[in-house]
Image (spheres, coloured by chain):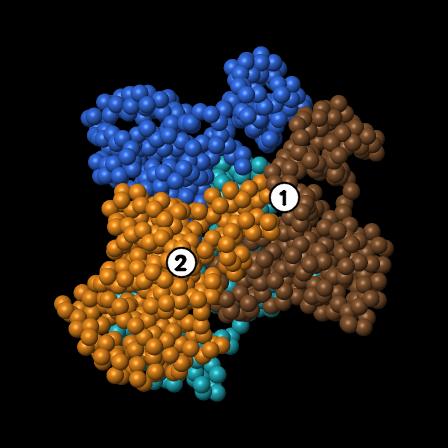
Chain colours: A blue, B brown, C cyan, D orange
């Protein structure tokens, strides 16, 4: 049994679902999941579909070519097909905070994430012992004003060497360079410790405390060149009160950050995310 | 422009989506919403689909017959087709509590609910002034041990006379008779003031207080012959603490009850609910 | 039995609680609720206290004078004492949206709010029928660029005539003048339809949709001269997804607005709010 | 600077707060936190108080004796005084599930929990590698029908040897014996994977799935002889839908269990919990 996941979008028009479901049926596939959405403002049709094929060996290349030369052409689709056989490679970038790192590695070791982590990279040495205790290679790539270009070159080299598919910034405290972003478009997942777009930038818990909000949040988003303004993948919030100090907010926020980042990683891994117009569609 | 909503289920098998989407396309319809679910335990395929037809006048009967004689037969479907043109009729049953009644009537007058309310029925006279101030007919049908059969007959008579499609028990404090339930299967919506299945029966806030729970809830479900055991449509919860008395729980619960019942009514009205095996599927 | 509520703050120092609890005991009162908070950054001590007195008639003036001439002096307190006997008067300002109005009036008629509503004021006539059906006086005070000063004079006149204690802006779509704000400092409660400080200003649901947030919110705050920047009393949020249009966000937001505004009103009515440094302390 | 935390309860009567705050003031203490609650049904007064003393060395024994011979006698108090100097010892009992273990150990290593973990005990060997990687002693105490008495004896021996103050059952899949419970009254914290009192006993996610609930939960409680019926410390919930299988519920529930258990541990550690009448008071 083989399974594919198809993500596609194109201008909205009649007959897309019929055409795609016929295509799957003609290729002896059985649709086990279909969900679609129409952006009425932009007139765009989006679809996510999972299909099983009963052949022993699925000729994925043949299927892709057939799809491309027929429906993709006919409807001018943007599309991607994934198979469940390939396990993605995820690099972790960290600095000094360890809570998201512990959380991700615990899930990784439990088998909760269908992913391979080839390495952890940090601009500091503090978290190396954690990487060691989980038996994951750790690279120390310090970043200073002067060494920034070399650091980025080193990062790119490691990412290519390990054939990394996507990057998770688990409280990595450095700005990602435009070059790295362009190499990994919508493939760098950040966790920001506020309910974006409130409290962009540094020290959001301090700002939240000062403003006297009754609810704090955390936001996971894809990294774009605009700071903290990329497509939002997942958000969550927690209630706070005047009795809580800034340190209490930070402590409470840690649990939010862990959960929100883990969920964003899972959505990305399970091919549930489409990005359009700096927003995400999450197909549950 | 005409719009239909199709709800269907049948044994899971290959090609259902392709067959249905072809059927719609052949009848010049355009699918604007499709969602499906497979119950892997029972091997049942469920689908909800909305389609627009560009004809001025849709021959609904012809469409239904065509669907019936082809796909329904082929796949042994259970199915229902609704059009947006018909406005359902909803009867409200109440006793003495007014919060859900005020909430529903406020939404009704605001135009939030695409429904007609032909009457409000109560076993008490207390809420008549509210019905009057909203200009809705009010029927007082007292229920005592001795008069129960006559009361039920009167209820059924009113429901038929007003061609009521479904009933909302907005904190109606009487057991519904099996006869009425069988006339309105999965068409009587109740609000229970606990997080079911915890605290079935009377005085759930008292039980919740006694057990010392940290969260209370409310549950809206279809009425079946088993008390508080029908298919759950919607639930919500709120955090409580030791500082809150039973009266505080009751007060906090009122807001839960209002929101949960209103959401259940909306799901039902928008044809988003399918019932199978004493559970609901809610297609968002 | 008489009950008072004391709210106070002063510079933090040793012995305040002992001194106040002694004062209450010496005056034959029994403390039934005490909660305190210290703002460590500003070094301010805050306390809320409820006390019962077993005398038939409490000489409140005498008690206040005794408190003033001893503890208030000794600790340089800012303080206020309320009795439960006096029912506050709340004016409602509305424009064209009716959901918050229906919600507040339903609670009012149910006896959920210990308050008197002397009148509803609007710059439009649309909601007059609702005021009529609930038997509450309705004043139409239109506001245009030219008539703004007269409109404000009329508002102030009505507020004084009816001895209004605080004002609730139940989706009132006009900027409140500095003069009115200064007459009712921390006594004008607004509901803003976003999770402040995100999406200040007009059309927050449109902005939320555009940004692609996964959670929307509502915020109730006291009105200050800075638009949407006053002390936050209450906030709540709801989860949304890409499937929801702007209209869906607006519909979902209505329920948030109703609950958040109602809770803010209750906190204010129950003397649970203290304001300091443009933030609130809410003593639950 | 020395800090104590006082927890007390007694029959409600006038003057308790004044008496206790005077006692603290006379002993040169400064109350930095006070919260109280009156159970009106049972007429019990509860208080939690934190006080700082400016002496270099606090003579705790003297303070306790003074308190005992005066106020405890006068009001017939049940009381306990804790100092922040003593770091409690917490034993972890686990079986085969690792998610709560990873979560607690991550927090422990991050310094989030002011506690010492002398050992991890399990009836299986599966999680030994995790204990090893975190450098915490691991004891394997298998439990079978025949060896149950010896296993319990071994457990008690280890607990005494390591002077354990309280026990956390991090998904430990064995019934705790009455003897162990009586040695650690309200000192054994369990995590149950449902929203109690719904779905007591084994396989709660299966039961939740079968009942078709729209929300699942987790509950942390003190262990008593009645299975899953001890005083509830903390609960939390998450929304689910018909699209989620039992395995999905289990996966989603893991995050709930982690957060709920961690919060219960923190409440217990920070002396925020009082137990009365099989319910908890949590002083935030």
Q: Observer-nearest residue: D23 or D116?
A: D116
Residue on which disc 2 sits: D146
| Figure check: B3 above or below B179 | above
Tell me the quadrant of the picture where the C terminus of chain A can be found: top right
Q: Looking at the image, which is closer to me, D145 or D90? A: D145
Q: Which residue is mark 1?
A: B282
- Tag 2 subunit: D
Q: Residue at x 70, y 63 (%)?
A: B172
- Residue at the far left: name it: D56
Disc 2 from disc 1: Cα separation: 49 Å
Relative vertical location of residue D159 with respect to residue A38 in this rendering, above or below:
below
Which x, y percent locates residue C222? 45, 56
Taking the spot 40% from the left edge, 55% from the top edge, the residue there is D144
Where disc 1 sits, the SS reads strand
The structure residue drawn at horizontal position 45% and vertical position 87%, both measured from the top left corner, is C55
Q: Chain of mark 1?
A: B
Q: Is residue C126 left or right of residue C266?
A: right
């Amino acid at each position: 049994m083989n399974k594919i996941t198809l993500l596609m979008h194109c201008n909205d028009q009649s007959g897309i679902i019929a055409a795609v479901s016929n295509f799957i049926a003609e290729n002896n596939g059985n649709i086990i999941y279909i969900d679609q959405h129409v952006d009425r403002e932009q007139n765009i049709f989006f679809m996510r579909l999972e299909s099983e094929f009963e052949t022993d060996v699925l000729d994925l290349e043949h299927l892709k070519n057939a799809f491309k030369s027929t429906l993709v052409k006919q409807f001018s689709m943007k599309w991607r097909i994934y198979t469940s056989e390939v396990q993605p490679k995820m690099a972790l970038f960290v600095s000094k905070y360890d809570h998201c790192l512990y959380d991700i590695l615990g899930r990784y070791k439990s088998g909760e994430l269908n992913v391979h982590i080839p390495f952890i990279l940090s601009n500091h040495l503090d978290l190396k012992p954690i990487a060691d205790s989980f038996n994951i290679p750790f690279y120390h790539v310090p970043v200073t004003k002067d060494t920034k270009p070399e650091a980025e070159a080193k990062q790119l080299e490691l990412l290519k060497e390990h054939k990394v598919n996507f990057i998770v910034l688990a409280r990595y405290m450095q700005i990602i360079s435009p070059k790295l972003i362009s190499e990994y478009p919508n493939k760098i997942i950040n966790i920001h410790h506020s309910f974006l777009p409130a409290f962009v930038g540094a020290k959001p818990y301090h700002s939240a405390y000062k403003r006297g909000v009754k609810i704090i949040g955390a936001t996971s988003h894809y990294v774009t060149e605009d700071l903290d303004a990329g497509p939002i993948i997942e958000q969550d919030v927690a209630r706070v009160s005047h009795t809580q100090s800034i340190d209490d907010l930070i402590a409470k926020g840690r649990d939010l950050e862990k959960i929100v980042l883990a969920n964003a990683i899972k959505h990305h891994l399970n091919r549930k995310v489409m990005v359009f117009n700096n927003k995400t569609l999450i197909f549950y």
